[in-house]
Image: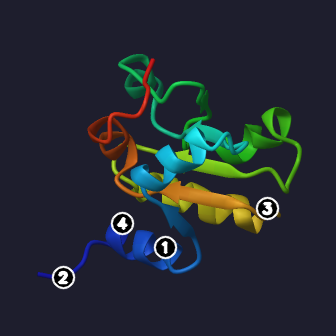
């Protein structure tokens, strides 16, 4: 079976994007690292629950709105979606926009919840 076009562009983006695991997030948060967590899922997904303290900037608007919410291009950003694909695409675009410290959460919100990280 051939790889889907979506999977192909995600794989391409992941070659340029750093990923962070939920366990690494737990360590970083416990240490008090200043991380800006951004949920790029749809509004309906956000409303069903999200990472505690996250900002919602859906995949459809993150590139347009990120500068209003996070003007510092050196801020450490961790993007997540449902499973890690949309966040990789968004992270790749933010890097193209000049953001220099961007991560995509591997496993997405599913991995976040499974790791027992705080949700709202």
Dot 1 or dot 4, earlier in sequence? 4
- Can you identify the residue that label 2 sits on? 2
Q: Is residue 70 left or right of residue 43?
A: right
Q: CA distance from mark 1 to mark 3?
A: 16 Å
Is 95 situated above or below 36? below
- Can you identify the residue that label 4 sits on? 6
Q: CA distance from mark 3 to mark 4?
A: 22 Å
Q: Position of residue 25 (x, y in %)?
A: 51, 49
Q: Position of residue 17 (x, y in %)?
A: 57, 70
Nearest to viewer (mark 2 / mark 1): 1
Nearest to viewer (mark 3 / mark 2): 3
Q: Is residue 94 left or right of residue 103?
A: right
Q: Nearer the viewer, residue 89 or 83?
A: 83
Q: Secondary structure at mark 1?
A: helix
- Can you identify the residue that label 1 sits on? 14
Dot 3 or dot 2, earlier in sequence? 2
- Can you identify the residue that label 3 sits on? 97
Q: Is residue 61 visible?
A: no
Q: Secondary structure at mark 2?
A: loop
């Amino acid at each position: 079976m051939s790889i889907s076009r979506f999977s192909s562009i995600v794989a391409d983006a992941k070659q340029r994007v750093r990923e962070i695991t939920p366990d690494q997030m737990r360590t970083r948060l416990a240490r008090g690292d200043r991380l800006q967590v951004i949920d790029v899922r749809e509004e309906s997904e956000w409303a069903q629950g999200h990472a505690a303290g996250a900002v919602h900037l859906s995949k459809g608007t993150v590139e347009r709105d990120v500068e209003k919410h996070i003007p510092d291009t050196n801020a450490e950003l961790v993007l997540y979606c449902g499973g890690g694909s949309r966040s990789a695409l968004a992270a790749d675009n933010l890097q193209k926009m000049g953001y220099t410290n961007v991560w995509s959460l591997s496993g997405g919100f599913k991995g976040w919840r499974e790791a027992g990280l705080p949700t709202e």
